[in-house]
Amino acid sequence: MSGGSGIRFDRVSVAYDGTTVLDSLDLTVEPGEVMALLGPSGSGKTTALRAVAGFVRPASGRVFIGDRDVTALPPHRRGVGMVVQQYALFPHMRVEDNVAFGLRAQKVAKGEIRGRVAEALEMTGMAAYARRHPRELSGGQQQRVAIARALAIRPGVLLLDEPLSALDAQLRSGMLAELSRLHRELPDMSILYVTHDQIEALTLADRIAVMDKARLRDVGTPRELYRAPRTAFTASFVGNANLLPVTVGAEGVAFGGTELKVATGDAAPGASATLCVRPHLVGLGTGPNQVAGTVSEVQWRGATHRLYVDVAGHRVMADLRELREPPAHGDSVLLHFAPDDAVLLSAGVTTDG
């Protein structure tokens, strides 16, 4: 990474009262890239973002924005914009004054502030609400104002900490589309996006960094992590996955006494491993890699049915286009999947690696 607005974590660790909450993070966000930090609560993702913002000081390691080492700089000298899930708008200020707040703190000339506030509100679709107070806005509108305030200072880096978690599903979908549009309009701005929502990460990010228990577990494009996860944790956290315990054979694997043809790479025959198959790639009826089981649950999800099937003592999920006559609880069924639709995860590749 050179110049520009990228971010680099150089073995960054953060500890609170002797407990490590971020452990030796090495990660680069390229200029203009959207990087999602995805993981469960307590995984270290928000701590990483706050280390970039300057709200936490690393116990060791360094944080770079572009070529600048900002580890010791206070937040107001880092040139970053930040949006959090609680909006954090000043209730006594009108929208335009909320958006102008950071510019006034930076002592930007009054004449320039007016133009930059108008530009940021226009960009976020909030120009018509400039004279309103936050209490007169919906949750989605308040979040747009918070984003406008972050954009008004023209940051090289935009930090988003669960920015959509307080919104309902329909508003969240609309805001995802707006964030994608904003990134197209501001292609040089790097975005670090913290979320525990896999749909947000898959939709918005150029790359996803998967975190768990204070450590980086995997990083790659959404397509890479979804189609060819490296670990069982990544497979289960980036999309839904069937994770089946198998034994490697000469031409495939054995699962519950059934031989399945899948690519085994350099896995040694006789080794234990985990087979990852996405539910939407599992079919109902006869086909390649066929297994027999008993339906334990049927869920109607509108456009699809999800079947939970007990196969050799293991629960297998199948997401199928809405069935006119779905099987019932207790029915015997056959499931199948194509050899190319399965990924073998070595037992030696764990989430602790």
Image (cartoon, grey):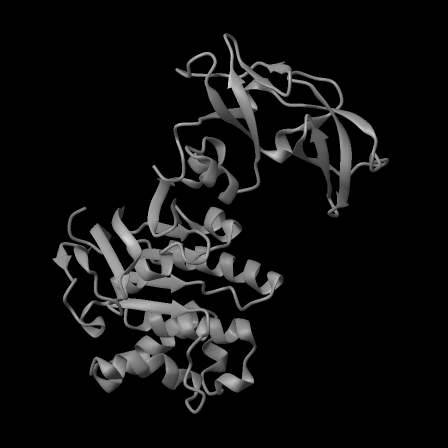
Residue 307, quarter of picture:
top right
User: Is residue 155 visible to us here?
Assistant: no
In the image, 224 versus 47, the foreground residue is 47
The image position of residue 332, as x and y in percent, is: 81, 27
Q: Residue drawn 37% across and 86% down?
A: 97
Residue 84, quarter of picture:
bottom left
Q: Residue furthest front?
A: 18
The image position of residue 320, as x and y in percent, is: 71, 35
Q: Residue drawn 39% across and 51% down?
A: 36
Picture quarter with the C terminus: top left
The image position of residue 344, as x and y in percent, is: 48, 24
Q: Residue drawn 51% across and 11% down?
A: 249
State left or right for residue 259 relative to residue 45. Answer: right
Q: In this view, does 310 lie above or below 132?
A: above
State left or right for residue 108 relative to residue 219. Answer: left
Residue 219, quarter of picture:
top left
Q: Residue drawn 77% across and 34% down?
A: 295
The image position of residue 126, as x and y in percent, is: 47, 75
Q: Which residue lies furthest to the bottom in this view?
A: 92
